[in-house]
């Protein structure tokens, strides 16, 4: 389909079904963001320097000494560094929740557009081998897709270059929702939940990047990182779309 025809069809669709902002419910007139309106888009908080080197959460004000935040106290990361694109609040929270819980594949274009607005994240991702955090097969069948895999694809497209996606992990134990659990409970809940994907080959010369939707306590990412470390992954970082 030609670009002009696609543009025409999108225009007709917007006339019949005007896009509505996920945050405030108002009509959206953006060209780049189709589900966040002009009034709400500035409320997407992009994470810039200075930030925690372990999880990416921003520091506010003067920063001295070690650049590790209270979110990571006691985490003992099995990976080197972590970055996040935006804070998990406001419009960004609605984008992730729509994708994750409402079968909202239509917001992926907006998520990718947000990622493209963050040059530092693009530089951080570019050229690395992305490893999505896996879902348990039962959960993936129920949801229909793994949102972390879709986010990895968005990161890879936005970063370009020789960025690639390689699944290296499987989730072998169903853990249920971790939303209401603290870090200690999450860590216990995730014990033996992940394993190397059979037949997956790890190249010790590559830099791998674990990808997940949101960094909350880091327990899920760290559980995956430990498995990859034991499997021979020497150069390992993490990235998430949101933090909070």
Image: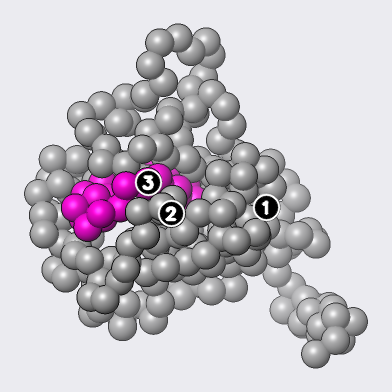
Pointers 2 and 3 in contact (CB under 8 A)? yes
How far apart are the two marked residues, 2 and 3, measured between alpha carbons? Answer: 7 Å
Residues in magenta?
A: 222-244
Residue 94 x %, y %: 51, 56
From the image, tell me which residue sits under label 3.
235
Q: Earlier in the sequence, mark 2 or mark 3?
A: 2
How far apart are the two marked residues, 1 and 3, measured between alpha carbons? Answer: 25 Å
Q: In the depicted view, which residue is nearer to us: 47 or 67?
A: 67
* Position above or below: 227 against 74: below
How far apart are the two marked residues, 2 and 1, measured between alpha carbons? Answer: 24 Å
Pointers 1 and 3 in contact (CB under 8 A)? no
- Name the image quarter holding residue 110: bottom right
From the image, tell me which residue sits under label 1.
116
Residue 29 x %, y %: 80, 61
Residue 76 x %, y %: 22, 33
Q: What numbered label is drawn on residue 206?
A: 2
* Position above or below: 44 against 211: above
Q: In the depicted view, which residue is nearer to us: 82 or 108?
A: 82
Q: What numbered label is drawn on residue 154?
A: none
Pointers 2 and 1 in contact (CB under 8 A)? no
């Amino acid at each position: 389909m030609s670009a002009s025809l696609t543009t025409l069809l999108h225009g007709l669709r917007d006339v019949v079904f005007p896009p509505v902002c996920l945050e405030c419910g108002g009509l959206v007139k953006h060209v780049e963001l189709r589900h966040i309106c002009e009034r709400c888009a500035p409320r997407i908080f992009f994470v810039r320097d200075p930030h925690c080197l372990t999880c990416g959460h921003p520091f506010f004000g003067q920063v001295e000494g070690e650049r590790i935040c209270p979110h990571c106290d006691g985490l003992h990361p099995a990976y080197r560094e972590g970055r996040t694109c935006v804070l998990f609040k406001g419009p960004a929270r609605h984008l992730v929740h729509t994708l994750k819980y409402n079968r909202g594949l239509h917001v992926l274009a907006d998520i990718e557009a947000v990622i493209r607005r963050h040059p530092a994240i693009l530089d951080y991702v570019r050229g690395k081998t992305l490893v999505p955090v896996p879902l348990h097969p039962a959960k993936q069948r129920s949801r229909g897709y793994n949102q972390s895999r879709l986010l990895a694809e968005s990161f890879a497209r936005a970063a370009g270059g020789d960025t690639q996606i390689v699944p290296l992990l499987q989730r072998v134990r169903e853990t249920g929702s971790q939303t209401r659990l603290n870090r200690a409970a999450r860590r216990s809940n995730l014990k033996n939940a992940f394993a190397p994907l059979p037949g997956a080959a790890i190249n010790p010369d590559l830099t791998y990047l674990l990808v997940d939707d949101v960094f909350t306590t880091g327990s899920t990412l760290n559980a995956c990182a430990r498995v990859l470390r034991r499997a021979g992954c020497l150069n390992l970082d993490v990235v998430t779309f949101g933090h909070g």
